[in-house]
Image (spheres, helix red, strand yellow):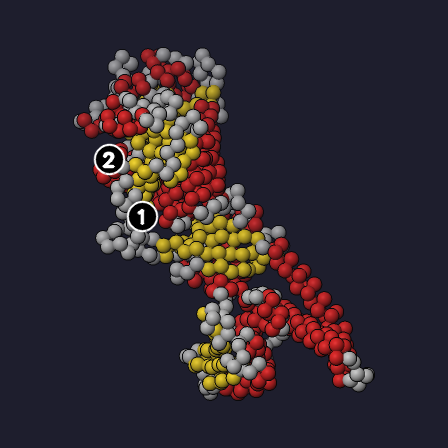
Amino acid sequence: MSKRSSRQSSPSRSRKSGTPKQPQKQPGQPLLHPMFEKAQDAIALIDDSGCLIDVNAAAANLLGLSREALIGRALSSFIDAGFEMPSLPVKDQPGQQSIGKLHLASLHQVPQTVEYSLTPEVMPHCHLLILRHVADRTAATEDELWRQRQRVELFSEVTLKIRQSLQLKEILHTTVIEVQRILQADRVLIYQVLPDGTGRTISEAVLPDFPPLLDIEFPEEVFPTEYQHLYARGRVRQIADVHNSASGLAECLVEFVEQFNIKAKLIVPILQNLPAHIQGASPAQNQLWGLLIAHQCRSPRHWVDFELELMQQLADQISIALAQAQFLGRLEEMVEARTVELRNVNRSLKQEINDRRQAEAALRQSEEQLRLVTNALPVLIAYVDEHQRYRFNNKAYADWLGQSPDEIYGHHLQQVWGDSYPRMQTYIESALSGRAVTYENDIVLHNGSLRSVDITYIPHFDEQKIVKGFFALTSDISDRKAIERMKDEFISIVSHELRTPLTSLHSALKILATGQLGNLSADGQQMLEIADDSAERLVRLVNNVLDLQRIESGSVIMSRHAYNAADLMIQATEAMQPMAQQHSIVLTTETVDITIWADADYILQALTNLLSNAIKFSSSGGKVWLTVQSGEEEALFQVRDQGQGIPADKLESIFERFHQVDSSDSRKKGGTGLGLAICRKIIEQHDGRIWAESTPGQGSTFSFTLPVLNE
């Protein structure tokens, strides 16, 4: 407060009324008496030689002498040894404002340390010196930081509870409960404005002593159109006493709220951005969705700024949930709004404050508030601009990379990540082109340890849909990767140990089935066939597991050469023809002479796996098609059947290991749940893609691409 008072009454401000006069050293005629009377900081005017021209009461109290006794004395006589006198500007070479600390040796008080700010030439040969106690400033700063931290923690707690639910009804219910708990209000409700102008309470938290308003529909007269327009423009209402004429409530509205025992109310609008596709809607235009309202029913209540700010922030959170907006995007809007506000304040302060510094200070304050939240998270959070330079990152970067946020700020990604950057570059370019990407990577920490991480890049667009940068979220998945490796090693070991006994068992069963060791009864022969089928399925499962493990571990090297796609298709069809005849399925092949770059054995394995699935899951008498189409850079292979189809929510998960759409049906068909997983790994090793499309009851189509060799 003292800082603002002193600046508003400064000499530079008084110059507007006319030409300033040369200050005179006349104790009986204070030059800036109106300003000095209300200033809480110690203020003094000194001349070019460092002598006091005029002081206020606070300065006289600080220096231990009366104002009359101080005027004309040298300021240096009050400065303790070891501290230099504030430097004054050299003639014809005026200096800028200087700040520092002094140790004052007062005549009647204990020596004390103060901070000073010296503004030269506020008037000709007259310099403004402001002194303030370091202890008072530190205590005020700590008190303000404590209050800000308490508000941030409280708001973060409520926001976390809201964000833990994805259901709008639960979000609204959580909001009213938490607001009532924090504000200790008698009733908190969310009022939705309906399209016809009426409205109703859709969520409420109310003490048992007062009547509930939930699901009560209110007529349009209670909330007329002009009120809706005012709230749509962001109006908030703080009514300490509904019966006070100063509240501006109409008599009919006072009578209406009396029936619900309402004595005071706090109203904040919940706004939505109009969709861009609505004709005539601008990006900044808002639509009133409803109101967040707090009631005090026992007695009138004066609402404080913190309560209003909390209600407004929670209303913003509800708006975000309604519009499915991103939280970080909302923070940027808050920073921009704060910057505009600071610039307006800057204009009123004229020459005394530089607007660029004020805007930067506001941005730093907003960034610190964001850091309070992000620094507590065990993940890397950063914002990178369109030039791939860091503009924000949380404290976790120091723990992981050994570089503080200040050291990283403004540096290029390649400078921070070094050898890891080439593996990230493709994904960074995708994010800067406007696509959200998620991928896994291995990074080396500053202590030399290797970490597996999951990285997500979320593009940031401006109002013109131009990418301004992206948000980067990086989390440690080393433990999960270690578990996956242990699982793969376990499966590999078990599979290797099972292969030899299973092969022997299967061979023995085959010998018994031929009758070389004697004939069995009909029941015995049936049991032997069941055992032989089961052993064959186990052998196939073990072989598939080992194939998949070898491909994933990288021990398999694809020997790629130029092959005719038509030849591979014919070989795959001939290999599956006996199975097709056994199931009464007609195989149809539509070949095209296309030269592909592939490992023939593995592509044949992928084709036979897909054809086998299509045959097994097709009805007797159906058809299965194998086709290929040529593109500029890749060939498209497709296997289509007329089977039972696959549900839409299973089309991606069927390519995972041991995943089956219907496990009971798969057992009857003899499936292992690994065929499609192997196909995906084979195709991905060939730099291709594989996917499935299906209509339940009409059949499925499995497609994959392979690079074309352009001669």
Mark 1 element type:
strand
Side of 161 where 302 appears, left or right: left
Looking at the image, is mark 1 or mark 2 earlier in the sequence? Answer: 2
Q: What's the residue at 45%, 70% (across, down)? A: 695
Q: CA distance from mark 1 to mark 2?
A: 26 Å
Q: Position of residue 308 (x, y in %)?
A: 36, 32
Side of 323 where 692 appears, left or right: right
Name the residue that disc number 2 marks: 221
Name the residue that disc number 1 marks: 273
Q: Note whether residue 428 is visible.
A: yes
Residue flagged by tag 1: what amino acid is it?
Asn
Q: Is residue 671 above or below residue 133?
A: below
Q: What's the residue at 50%, 68% (across, down)? A: 646
Mark 2 element type:
helix
Outermost residue on the right side: it is 517
Tell which of 243 and 459 is nearer to you.
243
Q: Position of residue 335 (x, y in %)?
A: 37, 43
Q: Position of residue 228 (x, y in %)?
A: 26, 39
Residue flagged by tag 2: what amino acid is it?
Glu
Q: Position of residue 519 (x, y in %)?
A: 79, 83
Question: Quarter holding the C terminus?
Answer: bottom left
Q: Is residue 231 above or below residue 466?
A: above
Q: Is residue 240 above or below residue 344?
A: above
Tell which of 673 and 144 is nearer to you.
673
Question: Quarter holding the N terminus?
Answer: top left
Give the quarter of the image for residue 369: top left
